[in-house]
Image (cartoon, coloured by chain):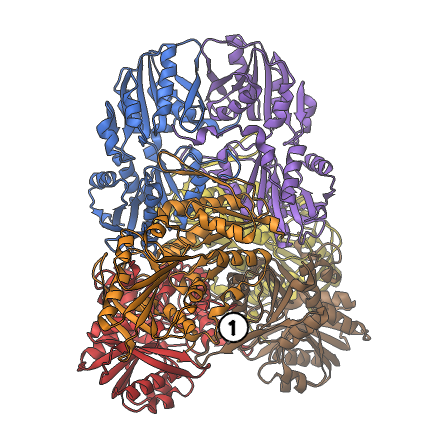
Chain colours: A blue, B orange, C red, D brown, E purple, F yellow
Amino acid sequence: MSSEDLFIFSGWSNEPLAQRICDYLGVSLRPTQTKRFSHGSLRVQLGESVRNKDVYIVQSLTDPVHRHLMQMLMMLDIARHGDAARVTAVIPYYVYGRADKKDAPRISIAAKLLAQLIETAGADRVIALTLHSAQTHGFFDVPLDHLTSLRVLVDYFKQQDLRDTVVVSPDVGYAKQATKLAGALGVPLAIGSKVRLDDKRVEIKAVLGAGSYVPKRAIVIDDEIATGGTMVEIVKAMKKEGTEEFSLACTHGLFTDNAVDALNGIECVNEIVCTDSVYAPDAVEGIHKLHVQSVASVIGDAILCNHEGRSVGELFTFWEEGFPADSSLG
Amino acid sequence: MSSEDLFIFSGWSNEPLAQRICDYLGVSLRPTQTKRFSHGSLRVQLGESVRNKDVYIVQSLTDPVHRHLMQMLMMLDIARHGDAARVTAVIPYYVYGRADKKDAPRISIAAKLLAQLIETAGADRVIALTLHSAQTHGFFDVPLDHLTSLRVLVDYFKQQDLRDTVVVSPDVGYAKQATKLAGALGVPLAIGSKVRLDDKRVEIKAVLGAGSYVPKRAIVIDDEIATGGTMVEIVKAMKKEGTEEFSLACTHGLFTDNAVDALNGIECVNEIVCTDSVYAPDAVEGIHKLHVQSVASVIGDAILCNHEGRSVGELFTFWEEGFPADSSLG
Amino acid sequence: MSSEDLFIFSGWSNEPLAQRICDYLGVSLRPTQTKRFSHGSLRVQLGESVRNKDVYIVQSLTDPVHRHLMQMLMMLDIARHGDAARVTAVIPYYVYGRADKKDAPRISIAAKLLAQLIETAGADRVIALTLHSAQTHGFFDVPLDHLTSLRVLVDYFKQQDLRDTVVVSPDVGYAKQATKLAGALGVPLAIGSKVRLDDKRVEIKAVLGAGSYVPKRAIVIDDEIATGGTMVEIVKAMKKEGTEEFSLACTHGLFTDNAVDALNGIECVNEIVCTDSVYAPDAVEGIHKLHVQSVASVIGDAILCNHEGRSVGELFTFWEEGFPADSSLG
Amino acid sequence: MSSEDLFIFSGWSNEPLAQRICDYLGVSLRPTQTKRFSHGSLRVQLGESVRNKDVYIVQSLTDPVHRHLMQMLMMLDIARHGDAARVTAVIPYYVYGRADKKDAPRISIAAKLLAQLIETAGADRVIALTLHSAQTHGFFDVPLDHLTSLRVLVDYFKQQDLRDTVVVSPDVGYAKQATKLAGALGVPLAIGSKVRLDDKRVEIKAVLGAGSYVPKRAIVIDDEIATGGTMVEIVKAMKKEGTEEFSLACTHGLFTDNAVDALNGIECVNEIVCTDSVYAPDAVEGIHKLHVQSVASVIGDAILCNHEGRSVGELFTFWEEGFPADSSLG
Amino acid sequence: MSSEDLFIFSGWSNEPLAQRICDYLGVSLRPTQTKRFSHGSLRVQLGESVRNKDVYIVQSLTDPVHRHLMQMLMMLDIARHGDAARVTAVIPYYVYGRADKKDAPRISIAAKLLAQLIETAGADRVIALTLHSAQTHGFFDVPLDHLTSLRVLVDYFKQQDLRDTVVVSPDVGYAKQATKLAGALGVPLAIGSKVRLDDKRVEIKAVLGAGSYVPKRAIVIDDEIATGGTMVEIVKAMKKEGTEEFSLACTHGLFTDNAVDALNGIECVNEIVCTDSVYAPDAVEGIHKLHVQSVASVIGDAILCNHEGRSVGELFTFWEEGFPADSSLG
Amino acid sequence: MSSEDLFIFSGWSNEPLAQRICDYLGVSLRPTQTKRFSHGSLRVQLGESVRNKDVYIVQSLTDPVHRHLMQMLMMLDIARHGDAARVTAVIPYYVYGRADKKDAPRISIAAKLLAQLIETAGADRVIALTLHSAQTHGFFDVPLDHLTSLRVLVDYFKQQDLRDTVVVSPDVGYAKQATKLAGALGVPLAIGSKVRLDDKRVEIKAVLGAGSYVPKRAIVIDDEIATGGTMVEIVKAMKKEGTEEFSLACTHGLFTDNAVDALNGIECVNEIVCTDSVYAPDAVEGIHKLHVQSVASVIGDAILCNHEGRSVGELFTFWEEGFPADSSLG
């Protein structure tokens, strides 16, 4: 398949990123017309024939989450029935990623349901970025390339003086991923023991670390920052113990509610780092010290490898050091 | 299955109708907790175990269309994985009903896509009311009971003096359904020849009727009223020809945009009749002469027949007079 | 894929059309051997290996309807299991098209069932011509190209003097399609109000037109002509009103029972126009003034676009004037 | 489920057998209306609501094979969409049973295709009688009860003097089944070595038996008799060797072409025995010495066991003596 | 469904547990005959008709893993085709649970593949116990009851003096589950930072705890113990820090290779606690201080709730305190 | 697709054959790493990226049958999720081939179940060699190339003096295949009437032949030889009748239990002929007069035809003489 057959379309959620991916690849973003009727339904039309093309639909599932979802599903459906050679959903932010298990009776494992809806609408393949849990991969019956943004975060922090620094996971549940960052940066790991008081409030009961060592600086890493409440609490808990400086990092900067104020209100923060997987212009403008790293090249490389039938594995090589740790038995 | 096993849950879109259906059936509406997170995703929990129950999920797909859709899909998914004996989606208003064919290249037959999503989420069966086209039935692979609200409309108009009255379909595409109402009321039919100027404006180029006869009164019937623009135009066109009085009727009173003002602004309107398939409290309060007829009994009867394994056919007997007209050949 | 990989096979129903398509495309019709055993079953063998080929199976589902259906299903099955690269069912006449809704209890939406059987047998795609309703498209889960024969009908009538002429749909249910022909020819529309008396007899109760205008000539258009009874009645009804000349047009000339005599018996008929979607040699010989327009180029173009991965949309451009009318809301 | 919920419908192919099954079970045969339109399509309507019923559709797939097939598929489709509790296809004669393997390139394993069509149309289960090969069972993804008619044949021949008698399979391919009959009757087996000269003519090159022993009488057994040609040849071959008397037996008496004359023309035939799995009134009247044994009780028992959830196994106990022979290894 | 319809069958892997479940429920274990041929294939026969029964197939996927898997798949297949009312796979030990993500290129998410095989073979539902990750639930398309054995572990340790005790997860990846045990016992948590040196050897680089606190005693909890190597290392690491006593606990006591010796060789171990989810008679005999807690009642209750259509939720109530922690956002 | 895209991987069961196939095709066998954990599960990793490749997974399903099966399923799963262009399972020995029918109640048609598992794991196509029954083909929903090894057997025996020789099928059930060999060699056929005494012992009650003729030499043909017991018995039975010399032939030389001794113990055996579809080094070394014919070229040719999209039919032409015999009616 020649590069003329590589067609990228974008939904409404994050057109700037889609454009950046196209710029990186040197192709034009294909036009899509979407109209919203007065009663709320959408009418989507792909602007060019996709017959026999290798089609990529880029959509971040950000707020309004479900409208963006339906727009993407319709775009997939059109491409399939328009007889595209192959249809790939490119989802920089996969909403419902945390709904990946049944931790209460009579709830939905919505991350699985979402995967089924995407397949039902016609995706032959999916490209996703930093899913909340690695297991979400297994919810898909179609091939999925699970890209990681940690490479861009490592590149960012590698340039800094990392003496007397720890990587902190605010929560036990995300500690596995933080381990990888700590390993890549060559610094120790600490883990927050988060307890949720109610929907809006969390408390960090303790920060588990190696004995009595108190680091001077902490890089707090999470997959996403929404209201910023967790970040506020982990900083508070560690400052009390003696840590003096903080870098806050995440892949998906959602910055919902009054996150701008909450994050600006934390003292001792050197920087806040996120990627452009979510389009959040208000946060970009409002949050001091926010550094947005683009994942356009990460996603662009994956699209190109897919299109040309080359291995995507090399995109992940950073994280494959030796035998994978936790698939083994003890 | 005893009536103790009949469990009705409702989404957010039209709880008053769900409650009315429960009241009609003498059962309690089972609780559902739905929470919306700051970044837009939902967390839905059915309030009671559905194991081995006959579950009905009531949701009108009204604005915000896609949030209501996802809420319903999650409720279906929960019921399925909660091992319900049978899960039925009850959809008084089926959005995307008009997207039932490919009338332009590279668009989605969204009414079909929607059916597939609903089945993917776990519906064993569907109950719907007055779909835009009868063919939409065929988009479903699971059994569907396509209920009609025309019975309540006929009941309403039968009590009036129908001399010198015609039933008018504002558009050729909906004329088949208008034929049924005309037949049931025993009055002639007229058909508007609608042309769409742009997204917001339509023009009625002509009203096709039987020769030179000009009726004194017209009952204009459509499946739904959104902005009211079509109603405004058909009345304008017929008044020019000499018709003096108008009744406007539909099943689904969406009343979007400034429909309240537009409808109140039409002169010579005796009444506007719709059902409670859509929950529209502003319209109910704002539109003069609005008569809302409840479909709770129509839907309730269908649920009961389903639950008890009795024929639903009798609910449609009104419309089955002799050999079905257009399945035959000429 | 080169044109050497384009393989067209034909069932028994309409080999002359299949040959015409091949001639139009400059390829040879590939051989098929079918044997019918004494107890009625078939043994079908494709005459050439289809491994990695782009295969098209041409079959009109005409009488004997079900034998032709099974022959096509077996051909699809063979091509699939013979590891064809892609298998397309080309169905110039899609029987059961009128069974597209449930207009009586306990009947089958056979147009949907048929779509499922065709997909089960292995069709990756379908090409169909002038389906009874546009919604039938949505019955298919595989891509379908719904071609229209109206282009050839418009070409035919455009060459005539169309003054004082109307296009007439004999039935409200088919009026939407007639609207398109009227629009393309730039003449007014009239609609017959057909009532079915019994299986064999229909009555046209009225012809709805624009006020008191009586055209001199009518072009009556339907999707198919079977016994010709409807045509007889609509002519009778309009002659009574004063129309003097008639052209009868359809896509699918089935001409069943004594259609030849019935149609020859109508006076004031200028011409009867149909396509070669149905192979009906007796009618061609017997019906006076019958003009058969070939759809070989329409289907051939669609096959070629499919084979070469080019947009089929341009084959429909005739009918896409501006925003599609009835997918919008009023 | 009570017996009130047991609903049996019949297609056109073998209503007498369906009626006999109903009589055996003491239930009434439910009405079905089928109409055939002038262009060949069918309109089928089940005469009673099947909601929550245990539905059995009885149809022998005899000539016109494909019309009967489509009628059955539509009946299954109606029952499924009519929300039957369970839908069982009862197929006394399964056509295409011999198309169970790919013995030439580019042909269809039509027995498998047929199974897929039946499942696509909505059969939850199937009851079949004496399939050509036992492996056909594996073509079905739904439960299948493969009934045998050998019990009635054994009952028939057990009453005779079986001294100096062999059971003969006219062909190596069917010898396994003949072995069972021979075993049950306690007589030796012989096997014809059939070669097919052309479509209509076969030749029995040799009859393989135990050494030089020539039996006085042969019971020739096959699964079906169509034109009777094979029977004519096997008798001819064995008479030449010295056998004097013949009984011809089969399950499915199709008796096609001039089978009546061919069979009447064989001398030395004591009797011809078949079942009523196929409705063939002309043969019954025309063939001398024809003894038709009814399978109504065999099928009726299977329906009853299914309906009441009892084991069907006992219906086959006759043939289960010890460890099954050919599933073991040597 | 009455309890007469509850049929439990067992594969070869853990018949003692299956018998204990039956004893707990007061039903008899139904017979299964399995034969292994000389070339390795199996022949499985269920000993009783399952028509219309509620069937449970109990199998722990222990070594020989794949033979036990195939035996279970065949039992499921038989039950499905034997027309069971419902077929549930009961899997006390789900092998391949750790293969739940793609942590290296070109490997299989075998936990997902396994789920698909089980569904393909006919399981309508699954009951599993303490899966390695909660997300594995989402790999199933059929309802799954994910039971926890933590209840029995909590019951065990609750009776002890828990002062100056911590719960330890040997690995960050399993820390979430350990958090639950710590919470239930009301003691602090510590987390081992495990690094895998090679296939057989791991190293605990650090034990993350709350500041400088060194507990006197540790309860080390993991989902399974295979060779025991991890346990050896975590004890070694903590002893070096000053912890004096250890309890080792897991759900699945696989005890492979020389686990018996390895575990017996650890000093300072008070007890080793596991359940009977795995049948390991050698370990039971060989490991000193081994306490096996039965999960027969946990599984038995789940089966009963399923059979009687009652909520299984109550079986998990222990772990549902308030809003689930990590599905929320921060 | 160029030959660079042809990737062949091998499981553990028969790497020598896989290597021979690669040598024949002039391609390299791609590396696969498989590790077996202490508790029995596997970890499989394909050694090269398969994105967009035409992948063939070669695995003979020999003992340990189920481990080899799972290894193959995981390899298929990896290739599918690794986005291979096409994945073909190449199965020289298909275990469970004899479990192709339900010859006892409540057993599994495991040959069908196996086909479903293979498809579930991601095989787009299958290549198999000499299945026990031709009908097994129909168990697959994906294209299958059923190769025959009879060509190599015919080549072998054609070079011998075949006067006064018969081909013998030890069992009626396999006689159809033996007929083909007899026909190809131009010698008569004889059929053993095998009765199974118990699991390990069979008895040949009679050898059916043409009258009183006693051949000097017999070529005994079966699809597989396991313990050799059947061969021992058929030789014994025929020697008693006067036959003096024997050649024993099969496709799949499993040689289980003490087959080596059993076969060496038969006198009057000229040769034992099998293929390398099964890797059995002990037998090759131990059995006197064993001649192993390679099927590498047969399988290699099929792979190449598949890869290049050429007809595989020619690989079978040997066996297609005229109209297939037993698909016709008599």
Decide if residue E260 is in sight here.
yes
Q: Residue at x 65, y 81 (%)?
A: D232
Q: Position of residue A316 (x, y in %)?
A: 34, 32
B8 shown above or below C326: above
x then y, percent, for residue A138? 45, 39
Amino acid type, residue under disc 1 in the picture = Val
Q: Which image quadrant for residue E182? A: top right
- Name the residue beneath numbered marker 1: D44
Is the residue D193 above or below the residue C326 in the image?
below
Give whichever of B285, D206 is nearer the camera: B285
Judge from the rendering whether residue E40 lies leftward or rightward of residue B240; answer left or right. Answer: right
- D210 left or right of D119 in image: right
Nearest the eye: A246 or C117: A246
Q: Quadrant of the C terminus of chain F?
A: bottom right
Q: Nearer the viewer, residue D204 or C315?
A: C315
Where is residue B203, by image quadrant?
A: bottom left
Task: Tell me which corner region of the image, top left, top right, bottom left or bottom right, holds residue B291.
Answer: bottom left
